[in-house]
Amino acid sequence: MRTISQSRSRWATRLSAFAAALYCVPLITAASAAPPESGLWYDDTGRGAVKIAPCGNKLCGHIVWLQDPAGSNGKPLRDKYNPQPEMRNRLICGIQVLGNLAPQSDGKWGQGWVYDPKVGKSYSVEISLASTNKLAVFGYAGVKLFGKTLYWKRAPGNLPRCSHAARASQQ
């Protein structure tokens, strides 16, 4: 026959396990939620939009909209300034331009890279929200002291995306 203290001990153990499980639920939910930097953003020129989304535990960004997706020759814009010759024929619309952004202790996302297809160069980058609808994109080459902050504006969710079918038909 069990004593009252044994029953209370078992009850306390079960209650502690249940309380611990409840305590962890918000942490799991918060960890799986997309960070506020995720979403659709117009670049600093307003002529392109990048979709930022989680890639594993980091953030990535791809060009998903261009105001003028075709060059003066009427053909889709290509990555013609890329330093890698084998990449110069790929379409601008759809390429990854942000990568490897990891959460930092100061609340920013950093240690990543940003690629500028207008010049074919990559830079180190960190991003952070300046406000709900404004993203600070700080790019630098080597030394942060000589970096530059550009501001991206949140784009509407219904912004038309680059169409793979339309892009393929224009090749």
Image: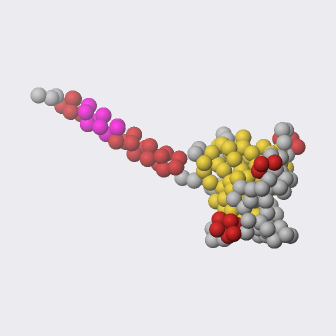
Indicate whether residue 20 is drawn in magenta: no
The residue at 65%/65% (across/down) is 164
Q: Quadrant of residue 72?
A: bottom right
The residue at 78%/43% (across/down) is 124
Give the left or right position of residue 21, taking residue 112 as reference.
Answer: left
The residue at 74%/56% (across/down) is 90
Q: Is residue 109 above or below residue 171?
A: above
- The percent coordinates of residue 82 (x first, y second) are 82, 50
Image quarter hosting the N terminus: top left
* Secondary structure, magenta segment, majority class: helix
Q: State how many labels appear.
A: 0
Q: Which residues are magenta?
A: 9-17
Q: Quadrant of residue 8?
A: top left
Image quarter hosting the C terminus: bottom right
Q: Quadrant of residue 51?
A: bottom right
- The percent coordinates of residue 91 (x first, y second) are 74, 59
> 29 or 71: nearer the eye?
71
Q: Is residue 159 above or below residue 38?
A: below
Q: Is residue 156 visible?
A: no
Q: Is residue 38 above or below residue 1?
A: below
Q: Is residue 60 visible?
A: yes
Q: Is residue 77 above or below residue 24?
A: below
- The percent coordinates of residue 135 (x first, y second) are 73, 57
- The percent coordinates of residue 131 (x first, y second) are 71, 59
Give the left or right position of residue 136, taking residue 5 as reference.
Answer: right
State the residue lying farthest toward the right: 146
